[in-house]
């Protein structure tokens, strides 16, 4: 392995034939073995987070990156139209539900 920090490159120093041979051997063995999940959070992470090369983010979250630009600002559950709020002299905002 040769890593050049100035160029930002990493190169494996074996032939293409050797890479193909190693890949075939690994595939024949069933690929890399992963330990069993130990917590539900580990299982969620492993099943939903993408590869480092694509940002290692929750893959389902990428659909919401520009949500305001695509469908508009998300509704605000805290100050909906069904709530009546007023400012009082103590500078607090007091709200009540009409139902």
Image: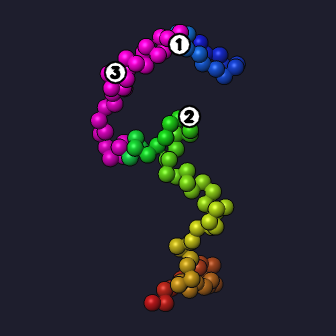
Q: Which quadrant of the figure contains the C terminus?
A: bottom left
Depicted 27 relative to depicted 66: above or below: above
**Percent x, y of residue 91:** 63, 78
Residue drawn at the location 63% of the way across and 57% of the way down: 66
Which mark is first along the chain, 3 or 2? 3
Determine whether 87 is above or below 77 in the image. below
Q: Earlier in the sequence, mark 1 or mark 3?
A: 1
Disc 2/disc 3 C-alpha distance (Å): 25 Å
Query: Is residue 94 visible to the viewer in this orientation of the structure?
Result: no
- Residue topped by disc 1: 16
Q: Which residue is mark 3?
A: 28
Q: Which residue is mark 2?
A: 53
Q: Residues within 10 Å of mark 1 (few under 14, many from 20)?
A: few
Residue 96 in view: yes
Q: Nearer the viewer, residue 32 or 43?
A: 32
Label 2 neighbour load within 10 Å: few <14, some 14-19, many 20+: few
Would you identify the image quadrant in which residue 11 lies?
Answer: top right
Q: Quadrant of the N terminus?
A: top right
Give the spatial CA distance, label 1 vs label 3: 18 Å
Q: Can residue 40 be found in the magenta stretch?
A: yes
Magenta region includes residue 24: yes
**SS for callout 3:** helix
């Amino acid at each position: 392995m040769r890593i050049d920090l100035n160029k930002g490159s990493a190169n494996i120093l074996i032939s293409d034939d050797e890479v193909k041979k190693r890949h075939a051997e690994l595939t024949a063995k069933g690929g890399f073995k992963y330990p069993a999940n130990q917590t539900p959070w580990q299982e969620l992470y492993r099943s939903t987070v993408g590869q480092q090369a694509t940002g290692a983010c929750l893959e389902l979250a990428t659909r919401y990156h520009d949500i305001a630009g695509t469908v508009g600002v998300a509704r605000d559950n805290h100050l909906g139209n069904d709530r009546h709020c007023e400012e009082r002299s103590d500078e607090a905002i007091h709200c009540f539900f009409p139902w």
